Amino acid sequence: MSIKQQVATQAKAARQAGRKLALLSTAIKNQALDAMAKALEDNKQQIIAANEQDVAAAKERDLSPALIDRLTLNAKRISGMAGALRELIALPDPVGEVIRMRRRPNGLQVGRMRVPLGVVGIIYESRPNVTADAAGLCLKSGNAVILRGGSEAIHSNTAIARILSRAASDAGIPQGAIGLIENTDRAAVNEMLKLEEYIDVIIPRGGESLIRMVVQNSLIPVIKHYKGVCHVYVDEDADLDMAENIAYNSKVQRPGVCNAMETLLVHQGVAEWFLPPLFEKLRAAGVEIRGCAATGKIVPGTLEATEDDWYAEYLDLILAVKVVSSMEQALEHIHKYGSGHSEAIVTSNYTTARRFIEQADASAVFVNASTRFNDGGELGLGAEIGISTQKLHARGPMGLEELTCTKFVVYGDGQIRE
Amino acid sequence: MSIKQQVATQAKAARQAGRKLALLSTAIKNQALDAMAKALEDNKQQIIAANEQDVAAAKERDLSPALIDRLTLNAKRISGMAGALRELIALPDPVGEVIRMRRRPNGLQVGRMRVPLGVVGIIYESRPNVTADAAGLCLKSGNAVILRGGSEAIHSNTAIARILSRAASDAGIPQGAIGLIENTDRAAVNEMLKLEEYIDVIIPRGGESLIRMVVQNSLIPVIKHYKGVCHVYVDEDADLDMAENIAYNSKVQRPGVCNAMETLLVHQGVAEWFLPPLFEKLRAAGVEIRGCAATGKIVPGTLEATEDDWYAEYLDLILAVKVVSSMEQALEHIHKYGSGHSEAIVTSNYTTARRFIEQADASAVFVNASTRFNDGGELGLGAEIGISTQKLHARGPMGLEELTCTKFVVYGDGQIRE
């Protein structure tokens, strides 16, 4: 079979499985999630053995320690994957909910019923836990899933997907509902992206170049986020202790993730008092600071930021700092350099807070809270399959509900159109 | 300026206008809609003169009478366009609504605020009224719009867009909020489809080939529907008088539109009684019928349907008819040949109705009502910018709310992540 046929056969099977899966009861889906969690735990050794092959190959190819860490599975991480599947059991099933049911003047009853998207394609890199997370979220929301992980994790992903798929089908889930494309040829991704007949949405998870490749080649709608250049703006009316805590937390608590702060904007009216103690604290945590000219005047010796710094997603203990003359200037900076991910203001001024909330254009806007809260669990979605910084369909963290769509349902008594 | 620069300049202006437009009050937007309606009426003669140029060119190019009819504007149609703008005034402004605001365990208040998409690109053919409809819907929902009509309507579209844009900006709407790409070169569309930095969504309206071209070339998310192959299934438990009315209405009331029935499915248990009188009525209305073998046995002399007929969107007084042995067979037929647009069942059986509603996979599913109700006005949206048969973002008719997205808004008191 050609790569094209392989991928199409699998996608077609997913489409057929998706049709049946969409109609399964919540009880059966929950039983399957439980069985899948148990299967991961029961087959820990097999998964670890497969993972060791991937890790050995990664070391041979001299991949970075950070990447190898993300790739590595151990008993604790496998328990974590199983735990995440079990947590889905307690979440409400979004499928079948009817919203906004209203009666029309002619007596028609019109509502919107939440239904699964159908078949979800996930294209991801390195982290093998995505295999289990995505399979669980798609199953609970009634979707079939086609997984396409990176070649560096192929043994781990294959082991996990086969174990999950078998456990699910033993628990009454249709065959083909959880599929992994085991062919690591790049061409397989390109074929996958053309199958708009069988796949309803593609969610890429990985670096910006992977995501751009997917967007450029896909005929299927894509939900994506390129990167997170997140800002905290400390207003002239900020509680400076609160601002220090929020800025420190947004930068330092976990610098390698997309909702960490990359640039701090500070109102000129408070910069002189605010920056020196903050910088001391940040530097003690190992943060390198790159500031605008005004910053350098307030804290002499600060490295000078270049234009590139304002665009940078460091994902590291580096922070760009800019002093601004007003909230408007802060918003201009955010609109020019930001990525529409997470934006926060610290202020005690009611009007300023309201204006920032309205005007900042991002997937999540915070008043007096850390950008690190832009996360499915923290915002109350229970679990997330990714985050979207685009505007269509879903914006911000995507949970079970974002893996569904609605269809109009209309109940009549013989109405015809005049 | 190259075509690329022209289009990019316009899109950039739209992005800037969109930012301001997103923050305008409902009152100002409504005043602008009123001014735009008045401007269309005040400049009727100018629009008609421009339209006459398009119609003359169309006749010279021997375009079909149907196409020329769609292209033609007269005083009544221009009043209709103005009326549609005024109707938008009464509709609720979706912008600013906050939904599902809830308190998290740590005290954060988390909600989702409805905000405009930003810049909407509309690519359309022949009907110049789309220029006014789309401009009005986008304005009311706080979006800037970039219109790209077909070359056959360029004089009409240019006149309308300039009149509307001037009236809007006189009423306080930012310059650039209503833009028409006046360059009719096909290359302009291709440039437009690459500007993901400035345009948030593309809505193509026209024939299937236009829409496929847009999907294949766009880096910007597209909301679309390819075609409407809609079915009415008459169940064995149907009230046959009601079924006859619904089938007749779905086919005949306006056969040239996407929510008209193209294939009638009839349960074998009632076909013998149901089909002969229906066919008589349909034939009296000029409908050509193409039936399956069983249909031919019940009504001898019926033209035989071929495989192609089941896929056909006739948009004409032609109907394919198939006798099926069960609702399951009807659903199989719908899933195989349907386009996910509108599907109706006529039945008096509670269980059958419930199963059809759950299992039919379409933008709108009807019980005991005509497929012709799949329309923004009829389903209660007030007005529509198009219909979507895809699953992402919007499915079914799209009104003002579907021209918005949400962003998470989070109110804290200094919360940081542990």
Image: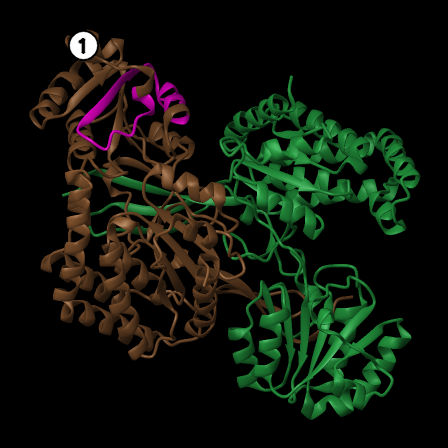
Chain colours: A brown, B green
Q: Position of residue B138 (x, y in %)?
A: 61, 39
Q: Residue B175: horizontal and vertical position, in percent?
A: 61, 23
Residue A291 sits above or below residue B250 on the image: above
Relative vertical location of residue A57 with respect to residue B379 in this rendering, above or below = above
Chain letter of the residue beneath label 1 in the structure image: A
Picture residue at 54% right of the left edge, 53% below the top? B394
User: Which x, y percent locates residue B59?
Assistant: 92, 41
Instruction: Give left or right: position of A307 versus B165.
Output: left
Q: Choose between B281 and B107: the one closer to the eye.
A: B281
Q: Quadrant of residue A138?
A: bottom left
- Please identify the quadrant where the C terminus of chain A is shown: bottom right
Residue situated furthest front in the rendering: A1
> SS at mark 1?
helix
Magenta span has B151? Answer: no
Task: Name the residue tied to disc 1.
Answer: A298
Q: Observer-nearest residue: B296 or A361?
A: B296
Rendered residue at 34%/66% (across/down): A140
Q: Quadrant of residue A81?
A: bottom left
Q: In percent of the image, x 86 and y 51: which residue is there?
A: B66
Pointer 1 local density, CA inside 10 Å: few below 14, some 14–19, many at least 20 = some
Q: Is there any visible trace of residue B400 in the rendered image?
A: yes
Per the rendered image, the range of residues in magenta is A309-335
Name the residue nearer the viewer: B119 or A311: A311
> In the image shown, does A44 or A280 lie closer to the viewer?
A44
Residue B32 position within the rendered picture, expressed as x and y whole percent measured from the top left:
66, 32
Residue A30 visible, this orientation: no
Q: Height in image: A30 above or below A380? A: below
- Image quadrant occupied by the N terminus of chain A: bottom left
- The three-letter amino acid code for the residue at tag 1 is Ile
